[in-house]
Amino acid sequence: MVFATSTSKPFPPNQTHRNKPTTNNLSSPVTSLKKCKTIDELKLFHHSLAKQGLDSDVSAITKLVARSCELGTRESLTFARKLFDFSYGSRFMYNSLIRGYASSGLCEEALLLFLRMIIDGVSPDKYTFPFGLSACAKRRTIRDGIQIHGLVVKMDYAKDLFVQNSLVHFYAECGELVCARKMFDEMPQRNVVSWTSMICGDARRGHAKEAVDLFFEMMSGEDVRPNSVTMVCVISACAKLEDLETGEKVHAFISSSGVEVDDLMVSALVDMYMKCNDNDTAKQLFGQYGARNLDLCNAMASNYVRQGLTKEALGVLCLMMDSGVRPDRISMLSAIASCSQMKNVLWGKSCHGYVMRNGFESWDNVCNALIDMYMKCRKQDTAFKIFDRMLNKTLVTWNSIVAGYIENGDVDAAWETFQTMPEKNIVSWNTIIGGLVQEGMLEEAIEVFRSMQSQDGVDADGVTMMSIASACGHLGALDLAKWIYYYVEKNKIQVDVRLGTTLVDMFSRCGDPETAMSIFYGLANRDVSAWTAAIRAMGMSGNAERAIELFNEMIEQGLKPDGVVFVGALTACSHGGLVQKGKEIFESMEKVHGVSPEDVHYGCMVDLLGRAGLLEEALQLIKSMPLEPNDVIWNSLLAACRVQGNVEMAAYAAEKIQVLAPERTGSYVLLSNVYASAGRWNDVAKVRLSMKEKGLRKPPGTSLIEIRGKTHEFTSGDESHPEMPKIEAMLDEVSRELGHVPDLSSVLMDVDEQEKRFMLSRHSEKLAMAFGLISSNKGTTIRIVKNLRVCSDCHSFAKSVSKLYNREIILRDNNRFHFISQGKCSCNDFW
């Protein structure tokens, strides 16, 4: 390395002849050096040394260098370096400067000076090494630190406790926890710094449990008392674990041990209790230590934001200001995030004004928060003004813009911004993939995921796989689902309860309940969402009894059911025809579990009763509801009327829907089908004319089938598929072999019988079935996903095909799964 040097001294030489200084006139200026607290005072002090002829005195200059380094400003360090460069560089001077640079974050300068010290032949001592290792730790330069470690061993300082502690700290801060622990375990003697370095290293590097275990080992095994830094680290570890019981033990130790409680410790305790959802204890601590502690207020506010308690967060900030505490930039991040969650642009603008008045606009994270807030409040122009003014547009900045577009439903703009980003991280990819899934662009999301895999340095995480698994589940593509699960296992992506629940749902939607349940049983911790996914998997596959068993098992394990799991249980009863069990579960909601039934639960009950033919009872339930029935509930009754053929009640339900949701296409289609089934073609024409006048169109029936990893889509009546001649030949073959007599009542059109036969033969699920027969190996399962309810004729056709060709056919319609084998269906013809 090359070091620049100057040819002229930075200070004018002393031209005046003086007598040799004495001890008396030396003591006065050196003593006053301790009083110097600014760079100007230090320069005046140096000037006084020059006047007295002491500017060449090694002892005085050494102490001046040391004091300049202690100030720690860039200007004072520059001043110290000039003094150092024009004097004899003693070991003490080197140590002072290296320490000053490292403490001020000028780590590269510290390491360059360390190197110069070695080149100049000045031997490092037990103080030099820790200062150099501190610079390596802050800069995360593992290679330089290892070289310094080699020098430590070579120069026989490896047994010094101060040096050993620095090595433990260095390796821990650089994430080399195995090396750090090896150093720690080999130490013959350890003090509180040794233990704290190791505990903090574990806590900060995702090994929170190890940090807590090490703390209790320290307390039980050696006569070492923790300091406040130790306590803050172990409390933070408890917070990361969300382990309230252990956190309370640590708190109790603080109270009984006499450890001095400082502001940082109280803030850490409040943070821990709130992350463990013990807000009451956190509030007690907050009340005890008052609102004048800025760090404590920030801990309270940020956790309230994390919990979605935005009004409480803003309340803390108001209390701060009432107590005379000025919010800092951390406070404003919580305030802006609260406004963002509440979508309150008025309060957001007030926060923006405070930010500008106090000069916080220079902080990237504050600007990023403002951009996020304005995007969520649909003030995109203001967000872009902030974006354009930012000198340093970070990845977070770009990600906030992409996420904002997606939040506002503008996927095209989000995609365009994503493509123009100068760099992308996993958050960027997760945001765009999640946005595509959210907008129903499932195949596009999977293509983007495949593209992501070719990017260096970007590895999928649990969030990525949740989005992709969700997309796959909605597509019903089992081969893709298997590949996704293989990808998760191969790349050792942690399957936590959230990802596990998504995988269970994915396989259940893809018609593989066995794998879904295998993943469910493999989850270490199952929350209500996981049980809900398992219950839904059994219900969708037609195993209603097992779904109810799972529901009961969940309750027996002490989990409190929520509204969502009740929907899963009631839906299973509906699909399985378990009327009495469904009634019992519905009645237990409020009486036993304290969950008030909502619209969706009443809708499930109407569906359950309607499927069982109890239309009058379903209607009475609607009329007795404590809340106003919505269009979904009336649509459930209308659908039941369609199955049961009750024209009058169907018309009554449709009339209610047209008032509540006049643009609901499905209700018009259902009513039209009811009339058609009854042969009331004039009424059918009126309904269809009404649809045409309102610009409503019935969605065409479409079916998807996956063959060798590629998804093929068929639409009813569409003959454009390139394999159509072979498909027609297969349909003719099936009809001949089966002697299938089509159920012409499934054609709800006023056309002749021949036309009805042809229309039935071109239903999308029949086309997909025929394509599956000609495109897959004998004996393999045919899997089809349909967007509408499967008609009775296609259902009968599928049962006959399964028996004739010895194929299992798994057909998913918009309601449930039909597992068809050897002429029988899992729905028992009840759907």
Image (cartoon, grey):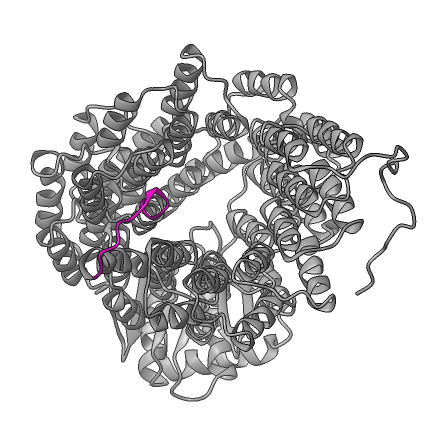
- Where does the image place residue 743, in percent across and percent down from the top left? 35, 63
**Residue 731 in view:** no
Q: In the drawing, does residue 420 fall left or right of residue 831?
A: right
- Per the rendered image, the range of residues in magenta is 222-231
Q: In the drawing, does residue 635 fall left or right of residue 343?
A: left
Quadrant including the C terminus: bottom left
- Where does the image place residue 328, in percent across and percent down from the top left? 53, 25
Residue sitting nearer the eye, 490 or 639: 490
Q: Residue 203: which quarter of the image? A: bottom left
The image shows residue 346, relative to residue 145, as above or below, that is: above
Q: Residue 488: which quarter of the image? A: bottom left
Q: Main secondary structure of the magenta part?
A: loop
Q: Residue at x 42, y 54 (%)?
A: 204
- Where does the image place residue 826, in percent across and percent down from the top left? 24, 68
- Where does the image place residue 356, in percent across and percent down from the top left? 65, 20
**Residue 381 in view:** yes
Residue sitting nearer the eye, 378 or 798: 378
The image shows residue 34, relative to residue 493, as above or below, that is: above
Residue sitting nearer the eye, 313 or 416: 313
